[in-house]
């Protein structure tokens, strides 16, 4: 039974971390879609990110600019 409760706790941790995946916690962080054709960076909850079929990453805005990303027309 001990094994089961450890497994349950593990599931809770996984669920929480996947939920906070798209969370921007620092003011200088932005969200990017890791598609090769994506050219923009976004604020949290941008509708354009819902169309992203790839992973969404949280990166520093400076990194986004260095990578050639531009502010999204919808959320910026
Ligand atoms: Zn956007």
Image (cartoon, helix red, strand yellow):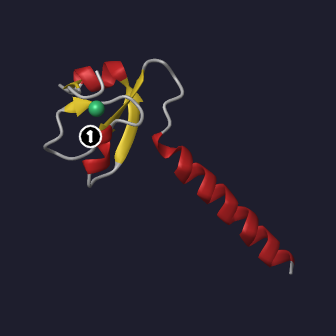
Residue 17: x percent and y percent? 58, 50
Q: Answer with the quarter of the image where residue 64 lies.
A: top left
25 on left or right of 42: right
Q: Residues within 10 Å of mark 1 (few under 14, many from 20)?
A: some
User: Helix or strand or loop: what does disc 1 sit on?
Assistant: helix
Above-or-below relation of 59 to 37: above
**Residue at horizontal 53 percent and vertical 53 percent from the top:** 18
Residue 48: x percent and y percent? 26, 40
Q: In the displayed orientation, state which residue is furthest to the left.
A: 37
Residue 5: x percent and y percent? 81, 71
Between 52 and 29, the one lying in front of the other is 52
Above-or-below relation of 63 to 16: above
Quadrant showing the C terminus = top left
Q: Answer with the quarter of the image where residue 71 lies.
A: top left
**Residue at horizontal 34 percent and vertical 35 percent from the top:** 46
34 on left or right of 19: left
Q: In the displayed orientation, state which residue is furthest to the right.
A: 2
**Residue at horizontal 62 percent and vertical 52 percent from the top:** 16
Quadrant showing the N terminus = bottom right
Instruction: Look at mark 1 in the image and give the residue it sits on.
Output: 48
**Residue at horizontal 25 percent and vertical 49 percent from the top:** 51
21 on left or right of 3: left
In this figure, what is the number of numbered marks? 1
The answer to whether the beta carbon of the residue marked 1 is less than 8 Å from any atom of ligand 1 is yes
Q: Quadrant of ligand 1?
A: top left
């Amino acid at each position: 039974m001990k094994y089961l409760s450890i497994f349950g706790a593990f599931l809770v941790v996984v669920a929480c971390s996947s939920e906070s995946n798209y969370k921007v916690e620092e003011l200088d962080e932005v969200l990017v879609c890791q598609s090769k054709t994506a050219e923009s960076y976004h604020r949290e909850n941008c509708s354009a990110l819902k169309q992203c079929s790839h992973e969404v990453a949280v990166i520093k805005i400076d990194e986004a600019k260095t990578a050639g990303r531009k502010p999204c027309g919808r959320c910026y």
